[in-house]
Each structure stands twice: as structure tokens, then as C-alpha cells.
Amino acid sequence: MTALVLRGVLVVSGTGTGVGKTVVTAAIAALAVARGDRVAVVKPAQTGVPAAEPEGDLAEVGRMTGLAAGDLVELVRYPLALAPATAARLGGHAPLDLAASVTAVAELAAGRDLVLVEGAGGLLVSYRDPPHAWTLADLAAALDAPVLVVAEPGLGTLNHTALTLEALARRGLTCAGVVLGSWPAEPATPDLACRANVADLESLAGPLAGALAAGSGRLAGTGFLAAAGAGLGPALGGSFDAADFRRAHAAQPEE
């Protein structure tokens, strides 16, 4: 995996829905802001939230990081909780255009040190129906941006992560690493599948780029900043040590 230089545009994808993309995106943003960087976060398509409601992933990012509304950019919103292309079609809304999305992100990047683009669902979820269908992978390619993969720690994650990494490789996209979006935190303890997956995920992707403690998304301010620093590796601005994490949590063979 190529080490990430935290400048320009970083695309944050997941191996699926509900894996912790928003919290990981917010954690990277919080650490960058604490360094004095100018940061923006873009959500190309927010689904499952009515247009009149303030709630959404970017509202959560703002709560955790303190970023102002002008640094949180949502390109379209579809009320139906479906994939963006499907939510647009069934809701009777105009689909999101790839070229317009590239332009919006590029314009933000011109005045920022770092722009984070948080996808919807996984890497190959469609934002528009054929014949002009496109995915987050297409957006990353058009922006020439690396992609950070957020994965679950538990049972089933190996196949989802391997498929995501294979899709990135086939498209010639740079993987910025794999972060576990919600690692069981005390009083919960990681089960055998979680602990075994530490080594198995690293066999797919190299050393983990981070593992955020479950519940980090409920924090804000200095508490969230501390969780972000502990849960993300140096390439993402934190102090997480993959080798220490592996020694502390990886499953060991029975004697």
C-alpha cells in the first residue's frame, strides 16, 4: 500500500453500509484541522434523509469536528434510503452528474489543504443509472485521488474487503490503507473472528491504517480528537501503531 500524503483529495469508501465511514472521515478531518490545515468534507449524495431536515452524515461530521457549514458540502440529497441511483430514479429526482461532481470537488480543493470525499455504501454503488452510470471508483479515478477503505472487524469482512481491494487494483486506483471503522471497546471485548481478522486483513492490505474504538462517533471536541489520534495511523495524522495493535489483539494459535 502506498503511504498517504495528507494533501489534496482523499476518497473515503467502505466495504458496505454502516461500517463507520462517517466517523473515520470526521476523525481524519479533526486531526487535519488540529494541525491548522484548511479542510472540506464532501458528500456527493446523501440518501435516506428528507430535504427539509438538517440531519445527515455531514451534520455528524460537523458535530464531531467543529467544521463550519461552508466546509461541509453535500451535492445532492435523496429522501429514500437506497443507493443513490435508485433513490434518484424511484424518488423522481435528477441524477448526479460525474463531471459536475468532479468540478465541485476540484473547486474546493483549490482553496483547501485537504478535501475528504465520503462515498455512499461501497466502492461500486452506482450514483446514476445507465447509460451514464458511474461509481465512487469513477469519481476517484477522475480526481486522481487515493481511496481509503473502511471495513468492519467481524465475521464476513474478509470477502468484502478483498473484493473492494481487487476492484481498486483492477482500476489502477491507489489504496490509502484499510481502517477498521468500529473496533469493540471496553466493556465489550472483540470476539475470535475480530481478533483473527486482524492478521487476515493485514495479509490482504498490509498493516492496518487504523482502528477506531466503537462509540467514538458519540464524542465531540477534545474527546473526539483524542479518539481520532489514538485510532488512526501516522499516515492519517494519528498515533495508532499497527504492530502494537496486532500484538495486543490478534488471535494466537492454540498450544
Image: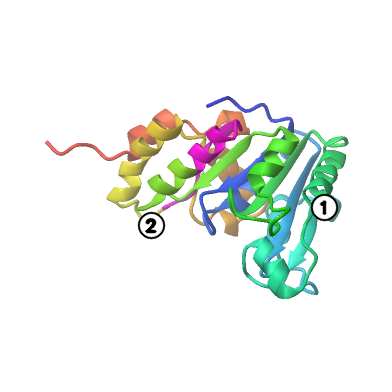
Horizontal side of residue 85 vs 230, given as left or right: right
Q: Is residue 241 left or right of residue 226?
A: left
Q: Position of residue 205 (x, y in %)?
A: 45, 33
Along the line of sight, which residue is nearer the eye, 217 or 192?
A: 192
Q: Position of residue 123 (x, y in %)?
A: 58, 48
Q: Is residue 211 left or right of residue 106?
A: left
Query: What residue sits 47% from the left and 30% below the top?
Result: 241
- Crowd rating for badge 1 (residues with CA inside 10 Å; few <14, some 14–19, many 20+): few
Q: Amino acid at mark 2?
A: Pro
Find the magenta span and give its range: 164-185
Which three-letter amino acid code belongs to the residue tagged 1?
Ala
Q: Position of residue 223 (x, y in %)?
A: 61, 50
Q: Nearer the viewer, residue 48 or 224?
A: 48
Residue drawn at (34%, 40%) of the image: 249
Instruction: Determine which residue is flagged by label 2.
Output: 187
Q: Earlier in the sequence, mark 2 or mark 1?
A: 1
State the residue position of label 1: 68
Q: Can residue 27 be seen here?
A: no
Total number of numbered labels? Answer: 2
Residue 190 included in the magenta stretch of the image: no
Which residue shows up at 69% across the image and 73% down it? Answer: 90
Instruction: Point out the residue furthest to the front here.
Output: 131
Q: Nearer the viewer, mark 2 or mark 1?
A: 1
